[in-house]
Amino acid sequence: MKSKITLLLFTVFAFAACTSDNNVTEPVDNDPITGNKMLMLKVDYLTNAFEGGTELSFEETDATTFTIETEYQTPGDFGWVKMYYAEVDTKFFDGEIHWMGLGTLHCPENFDPASSFDHVLTEDFVTPQGGFDNIFNPSEQEYDYQIPWSHVQGLVKVRQYLASNPTASAKIFLYTPSVGVGNPSDWDWIVILKN
């Protein structure tokens, strides 16, 4: 009799576990990146510390390519660099460049702090299958992009973007708001991923 009650209780508990209301969510690193989105990350030039990022969403969802058009005004005294997502005719970056001064970043207006980005729990190192594209390099200087990349490749959001567009390249450039007798501590790597 005791074994029948135990079996009955076990069956009831097993059935209750199987019929829960499915409020369980998947781990955040399995979240799909849907829609037409871009992830922009900021990495300090001198320390290579990840400083923050922002995710931009675009209403036009039928764009199948990702072309960046750049406008550049050489800083005689005051210059700028502006970048546009050509397929949707939208500016996503607008930063001043000052000769012997400090320019202002107008777009994007804000970056979420680095502390708001989750890291993967694994120790693996991933790189974009399509490599790196320097999309703005007026000095034509060669850089080792693996260094700034190493400080963002472990972000959950980065892994999500790489999974959603596995053959894409990471777009990267060095934003230097101060040039001439500029201060490299003002400079930042900007890393862009597209889903």
Image: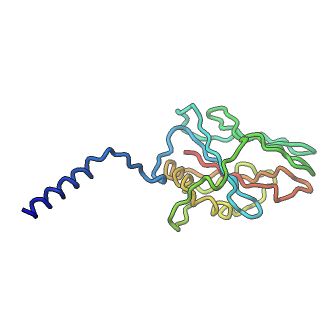
Q: Is residue 124 left or right of residue 81?
A: left
Residue 74 is at least partly visible in this image: yes
x 41%, y 49%: residue:
25
Tell me residue 193's x, y (percent).
60, 49
Q: Position of residue 159 (x, y in %)?
A: 53, 55
Number of numbered discs visible in the structure rendering: 0
Front one among 34 and 31: 31
Residue 162 place in picture, x, y as percent: 53, 52
Residue at position x 53%, y 68% from top?
123
Q: Residue furthest front?
A: 2
Q: Is residue 177 left or right of residue 180?
A: left
Most foreground residue, 139 or 81? 81
- In the picture, the quarter occupied by the C terminus is top right
Residue at horizontal 71 percent and vertical 44 percent from the top: 110
| In the depicted structure, whether residue 79 falls above or below residue 115 | above
- For residue 82, say whether it is visible: no
The part of the image, by quadrant, that contains residue 149 is bottom right
Report the coloring of the rendering: rainbow
Quarter in which the N terminus is drawn: bottom left
Residue farthest to the bottom, as pictured: 123
- Note whether 105 is above or below 130 in the view shown: above
Closer to the camera in the image, 7 or 30:
7
| Residue 121 pos. (x, y %) | 51, 64
- The part of the image, by quadrant, that contains residue 184 is bottom right
